[in-house]
C-alpha cells in the first residue's frame, strides 16, 4: 500500500521539523498502518450510527 509509505514519510518529516529524529522508517510505517486502521474503524462506527439513526426515523405502519 503506497499511501501508507507516503504517510509514514510525511510523519517522519513532520517530526524531524520539530526536532524529533528517533523514529525509524519501520516505526513510522507501523504508526501509519495503525492510523489507517483506526480511521477505518471510526468510519464503520459512524456509518453504523447513521444507519441506526435512519432506521429509527422510518415510520412503521401500525
Image (cartoon, helix red, strand yellow):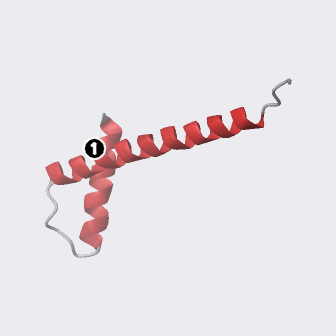
Give residue 1's quadrant in the image. top left
Q: Residue placed at 28% from the left, 44% from the top?
A: 5
Q: Is residue 41 rendered to the left or right of residue 10? A: right
Residue 62 rendering spot, x and y as whole percentages: 86, 24
Q: Residue at x 56, y 37 (%)?
A: 48
Of 30 and 16, nearer the camera is 30
Q: Which residue is mark 1?
A: 5
From the top left corner, tell me how far across and down residue 23 is, in percent.
16, 61
Q: Residue at x 17, y 53 (%)?
A: 27
Picture coordinates of residue 32, whole percent (x, y): 30, 49
Q: How many marks?
A: 1
Q: Residue 9 location, x and y as percent? A: 27, 53
Q: Residue at x 26, y 52 (%)?
A: 31
**Is the residue marked by circle 1 packed among few (<14), some (14-19), or many (20+) residues within 10 Å?**
some
Q: Nearer the viewer, residue 55 or 27?
A: 55
Up/down of 18 relative to 12, above or below? below
Question: For the view shown, which residue lies furthest in the bottom direction?
Answer: 19
In the image shown, does 53 or 3 lie closer to the viewer?
53
* Rendered view: 15 above or below 51: below
- Quadrant of the rendered image containing residue 12: bottom left
Which residue, as the protein is rendered here, is positioned at the far front? 62
Q: Secondary structure at mark 1?
A: helix
Q: Quick check: 24 left or right of 34?
A: left
Amino acid at each position: 500500500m503506497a499511501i501508507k509509505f507516503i504517510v509514514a514519510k510525511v510523519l517522519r518529516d513532520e517530526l524531524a521539523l520539530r526536532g524529533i529524529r528517533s523514529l525509524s522508517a519501520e516505526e513510522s510505517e507501523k504508526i501509519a498502518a495503525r492510523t489507517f486502521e483506526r480511521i477505518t474503524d471510526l468510519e464503520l462506527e459512524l456509518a453504523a450510527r447513521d444507519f441506526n439513526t435512519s432506521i429509527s426515523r422510518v415510520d412503521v405502519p401500525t
